[in-house]
Image: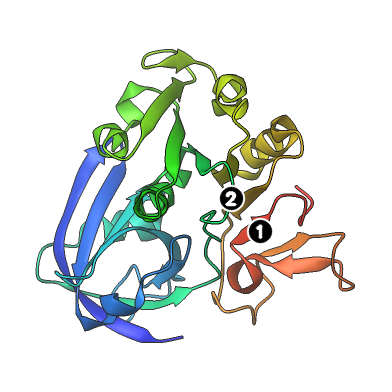
Amino acid sequence: MKKHLLNVASNIEIARNIFEMKLTGPGVGTMTTPGQFLHVSVGNHSSKLLRRPLSICDVDLDRKEVTLLYRAQGEGTKQLSHKTMGEVVDVLGPLGNGFELAENDPNRKALLIGGGIGVPPLYYLGKHLKSKGIEVTFILGYQSIEDSFYIEKFNEIGETIVTTVDGSLGIKGFVTDAMMDVMKDEPVIYSVGPAIMLKAVEERAGGLRGYLSLEERMGCGIGACFACVCPTDTRESGYVKICSDGPVFKMGEVVL
């Protein structure tokens, strides 16, 4: 684990309470694995606020720039949303285990499913999969059109299906309502989002190979504080630590 002091290149609201922050610095060169996250200090040096785990949305190695998308909803992320160009942000990482790329899958197809703030890490993953010659399809779920973001960017990588709970954009309903037609080609599934969504995706997947990235509040980000444990039937301890054992797990590896 490494600590990096990165400079804010931009920090703008791109949807309702959703911010896109771009950070630059030499440490970005280590952030090359899709699915990992950064533990970001959200306040000033005297702040008692805990760091926030933010998924890596994109990395530009030439510009030494990492993109983070986050929802400003609590005191910490609201403070982060006030950071301006030139300010310094203290981050730890990259942390966690990322996605296993499906480059050896015979079907050469991947289905990436994200809900809400679980959508961002799928962008970097999709770019990596496409670079390996894998056909990528996205299903992105939002509450409404006001909460949607990055749809055009995802479309540049592969077919992008959008669902909204209120029907204001794309298919009315949830991401699982759009899965069946895409699953006939037996793609490898990658999904990021809240546990209730991941459980529904796993059930709908019907035994297809897949990976789930869990969202959870974290204290230390390195597995020392046991604040982000999740039950599992695959380990003698009966639990895994999402921050250090995950956040990515194979389907069936954890109990949702």
Residue 252: x and y, percent? 77, 50
Residue 28, by quadrant, is bottom left
Please tell me how crowded label 2 is: few (under 14), some (14-19), or many (20+) other residues with Cα within 10 Å.
few
Q: Which mark is residue 105?
A: 2
User: Please, what is the three-letter code of the amino acid marked with disc 2?
Assistant: Asp
Label 1 SS: strand
Residue 89: x and y, percent? 25, 74
Q: Quickly name the residue at label 1.
A: 249
* Disc 2 versus disc 1: nearer the observer: 2
Please tell me how crowded label 1 is: few (under 14), some (14-19), or many (20+) other residues with Cα within 10 Å.
many
User: Please, what is the three-letter code of the amino acid marked with disc 1?
Assistant: Phe
Residue 92, by quadrant, is bottom left
Asked if residue 17 can be seen in this view, the reply is yes
Asked if residue 149 can be seen in this view, the reply is no
118 shown above or below 50: above
Label 2 SS: loop
In the drawing, does residue 147 fall left or right of residue 141?
left
55 shown above or below 251: below
